[in-house]
Amino acid sequence: METLVAHLFRFVLYSMFGLCMEVLFAAHGIDVVLGYKVPRRVPRKYLEGFVSLTMIPLHGLGLLFLFEPGAAAIQELHFTLRFALYAVGITATEAAYGWLCEKVLGFYSWDYYAGSKYRVFKRGYTLWTLVPLWGLAGMLLEPYSQLVKHLAPFAVEFFLG
């Protein structure tokens, strides 16, 4: 039961982190990486962000079962090599998840990538302009993941007494 609570705690924190980062990025940076302006419902000054709940499994499970063990396996490598591995690994994961969502759900929630001149694959499952940003995301996730793993035993104690 303790392991389940610890995993659930980390899943929730990873999901919330991922969704928050997506909203922040959608509010400010998405037009730059796409190479075109995303139509907005409200004026840009309101910093409207958008995210799909279909991203929860990618953020929660992906970080829990892919990022955590991957980061542990490469933690001793030089900064630049870790950056490159994160860039390639997260880009590949995004593309694979987009393909899977399209096959299972009939869409993937960032299908507006298909209209970008920077798209990877015909359907735009990811963007070339995102590759370095995914490397940066991996580097930023290292300390966050360490924090989440450090806090998990306290969550177990809180919920199970």
Image (spheres, rainbow, N blue to C red):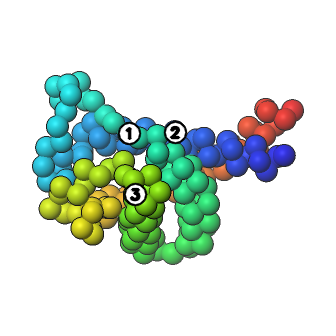
Quadrant of residue 13 in the image? top right
Whether tag 3 and tag 1 are in contact, CB under 8 A, the answer is: no
Q: Mark 1 falls on what kind of element?
A: loop
Q: Residues within 10 Å of mark 2 (few under 14, many from 20)?
A: some
Q: Mark 3 falls on what kind of element?
A: helix
Could you give the CA–CA distance between mark 3 and mark 1, rounded to whole angstroms?
17 Å
Above or below, 66 relative to 34: below
Which residue lies under the disc numbered 1?
Answer: 51
Above or below, 73 relative to 38: below
- The label on residue 102 is 3
3 or 2: mark nearer the eye: 3
Could you give the CA–CA distance between mark 3 and mark 2, rounded to whole angstroms?
23 Å
Residue 79 or residue 125, whichever sits in front: 125
Residue drawn where x is 29% and y is 41% of the image:
26
Which residue lies under the disc numbered 2?
Answer: 16
- Mark 3 or mark 2: name the one nearer the start of the chain: 2
Q: Amino acid at mark 2?
A: Met
Residue 72 or residue 39, whichever sits in front: 39
